[in-house]
Amino acid sequence: MLFQLQLLAYRLIKPFMKPVSRLVAIPRPVLFVGPGSTARLCQLIAGAGSKRTLIVTDAVLVKLGLIDPVRKALEAEGVDVAVFDGILPDPTHDVLDRGLVAVRAQGSDSILAVGGGSSIDAAKVIAAMATTGKSSAKLVGMLKVNKPPLPLYAVPTTAGTGSEVTVAAVVTDPVAHVKSVVVDPKLVPLAAALDPQMMKGMPGPITAATGMDALTHAVEAYLNRWPHAETPMFCVSAVKLIFQNLPRAYANGADLEAREGMALASLYAGLAFTKAYVGYVHAFSHKLGGVYGVPHGLGNAIVLPYVLDFLKDAPYAEARLAELAVAIGAGSASESHAVLAQRFVDRVRELNRAVGIPEKVAPLRKEDVGLIARAAMVEAYRDYPVPKNMSLGEAEALLQRCL
Ligand SMILES: NC(=O)c1ccc[n+]([C@@H]2O[C@H](COP(=O)([O-])OP(=O)(O)OC[C@H]3O[C@@H](n4cnc5c(N)ncnc54)[C@H](O)[C@@H]3O)[C@@H](O)[C@H]2O)c1
Ligand SMILES: [Fe+2]
């Protein structure tokens, strides 16, 4: 009963959040796109006056030899470089503390994140910790970054989270099994390079999961109730690019054209959802990530078709799904919304199958369903302008289908 009242309160407050969310201006980074664009970003970093840049990355990427050329490109421009390669997937407060130690040791005047969402998110928070003097725990929440962070640049190596253009950074608490978000427009990097060369070696399963994360961003933002003028353009472009390029990038990692298509899709989806938000899929996936460590993209990919099954008969969502079906060539605008919406959901399931995404969440346990459903509904009702209300019973039934 108390829980139902809590959800009702979120629903009543939600309409007042729309104008508030419109007041916050979101900057956009300078972008370099194409093979070799990382070198151009390095020139810009030097041109901006950086003397000591910390590369924030993970050990896998160092081992793959992706970091050395970046270091050399910066050094060639006269920038002193240190590397912090301690980022692990879903960075925790401890990892961020270690990153701050690396900033202090170098006396860094800028940070270059090279990696997936985990490295970029970590770099965002470390850059803010360095100037605000706040711990990462104190930065969790909305608009807590009270000073400009260290100048921050990004080279995403997954496609992806879109973190290179978003106001968000996700921090994981491994003890409480909770993923929290730092949200502040000051976190948006100053510049980024979408360099398909940096994505060539991404293994198939990571290509698939991160690509479906980007698809989820685009679809959830498109279905949500508070679109901005540019939301349809970014979402539809991202969805088309992902259906065209994800199977290609999955089948042949060295297909640079497909990699670039996915990098652009991830960027567009990031630009869309950083203003129009995500929805139920992310709410479930954040809990599955917090409780079982299910990788973010994989959790989204599995849950996405089940959430679309639930949303598709709400007229607003049905019409948007029908538009997406037409955009990817799965039907013609003369067909009924119901037929087209179903076809889009079927295509999402086919895409999942084509890139090896399972239909079930392997670690999900029956006894956790109630807890995860409640936590996911709190996040969805509190944070996202979803197109249809989901009851707790419906959330539990949805998770049962993932078992
Ligand atoms: N800030 C945002 O707006 C936002 C949006 C969505 C998700 N996230 C967060 O981002 C994190 C997930 O990021 P992710 O999905 O990009 O994965 P990730 O950064 O956690 O990386 C996953 C794995 O892929 C490897 N990898 C990355 N690029 C590679 C490459 N080019 N070649 C080979 N291996 C590579 C990494 O070493 C790592 O082992 C989660 O914590 C999620 O919550 C943030
Ligand atoms: Fe995501």
Image (tube, rainbow, N blue to C red):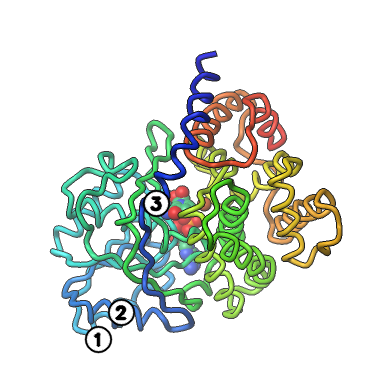
Relative placement, left or right, of 94 versus 210 is left
**Disc nearer the start of the sequence (2/3):** 2
Residue that numbered label 3 is attached to: 168
Residue drawn at (73%, 61%) of the image = 354
Work out whether mark 3 precedes mark 1 in sequence or the reverse, and give the earlier one: 1
Element under label 3?
A: strand
Can I make out residue 15 in this image? Answer: yes
**Residue toward you, 83 or 192:** 192
Whether residue 72 is visible? no
| Location of residue 206 in the rendering, given as x and y in whole percent from the top left corner | 56, 60
Please give the name of the residue rendered at 35% of the width and 83% of the height, measured from the top-left corner: 40
Q: What secondary structure is marked by label 2?
A: helix
Measuring from the top left, give residue 176's x and y in whole percent: 39, 31
Q: Give me the disc on residue 76.
A: 1
Q: Residues under labels 2 and 1: Cα distance?
A: 9 Å
Upstream in sequence: badge 2 or badge 1? 2
Q: Amino acid at mark 3?
A: Ala
Contact? badges 2 and 1 (CB < 8 Å): yes
Q: Is ligand 1 closer than 8 angstroms to the Cβ of mark 3?
A: yes
The residue to which callout 2 is attached is 42
Give the quadrant of residue 138: top left
Query: Relative to the observer, which residue lies in front, 376 or 297?
Result: 376
Q: Which residue: 30% across, 79% down?
A: 42
Q: Quadrant of residue 136 in the image?
A: top left
Relative vertical location of residue 46 with respect to residue 126 in this rendering, above or below: below
